[in-house]
Image (cartoon, helix red, strand yellow):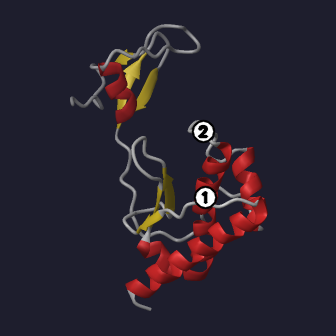
Amino acid sequence: MTDSEYRRSAAQAAEHYFALAEQRFGRSFVRVAVFFDLKGRTAGQAWFPAQGEPFIRLNMELLRANHEDFLVRTIGHEVAHVVDRVIAGRARIRPHGASWRAVMAAFGLPATRCHQYQTTAARKPSQTFPFRCGCRTWQFTIVRKRRVARGVVYSCPKCQTALVPDTSSPEHKAG
């Protein structure tokens, strides 16, 4: 199949799930744009920007490699997010909560969060940074290290002292 045929089949699958939602919920749903710009391990995402219309993002590599299952599970999963948001009528809902699971059940699909597709994207090993408290050394990810730099304070649950960068450790990395 060509990429345009894969895109067409994905658009037809999305249309199928929107039509099924209209039948099951007795209301109409606006169709959303579908983009094929995801890379790596993520198969699909439903986006709800503060300004503008919602849209779905899909991973073309995973669509090619898992075509039939992708059309059913991944596209059904992402359309269910859009349908759930429209039915709920509010922005703050649990992404994989009870209402989303009900939409998935209406689609006749298992309400699973993660795919089991083989991915070729290599994950970078996580770099960690030593922090210490009164009783031990902790390893922080770059996210927590940056939060500490912005003023967030983490405390040891055992000794209750603040966790600070361990500058004496040979593992300590500046940055």
Residue 146 - label: none
Do we see residue 168 in this rendering? Answer: yes
Q: Is residue 102 left or right of residue 147?
A: right
Q: Which residue occupies 66% across, 48% down?
A: 96
Q: Which residue occupies 61% across, 60% down?
A: 29
Could you tell me residue 23's position as x and y percent? 75, 67
Mark 2 or 1, nearer chain start:
2
Q: Which residue occupies 41% across, 30% down?
A: 140
Q: Quadrant of residue 36?
A: bottom left
Could you tell me residue 136's position as x and y percent? 48, 18
Residue 147's place in the image compared with 163, above or below, is below
Q: Is residue 54 left or right of residue 16?
A: left
Residue 114 - label: 1
Q: Amino acid at mark 2?
A: Arg
Q: Which residue occupies 48% across, 7% down?
A: 161
Residue 175's place in the image compared with 56, above or below, is above
Which of the two marks, 2 or 1, is nearer to us in this view?
2
Q: Amino acid at mark 1?
A: Cys
Is label 2 in a helix, a strand or a loop?
loop
Residue 57's place in the image compared with 120, above or below, is above
- Disc 2 to disc 1: CB gap under 8 Å: no
Closer to us: 80 or 58: 80
Q: Is residue 47 left or right of residue 96?
A: left
Q: Is residue 28 left or right of residue 61?
A: right
**Cα–Cα gap, marks 2 and 1:** 24 Å
Closer to us: 27 or 106: 27
Q: Which residue in the protein does label 2 denote?
A: 90
Q: How many neighbours does mark 1 have within 10 angstroms: few (below 14), some (14-19), or many (20 or more)?
A: few
Could you tell me residue 73's position as x and y percent? 64, 69
Q: How many neighbours does mark 2 have within 10 angstroms: few (below 14), some (14-19), or many (20 or more)?
A: few
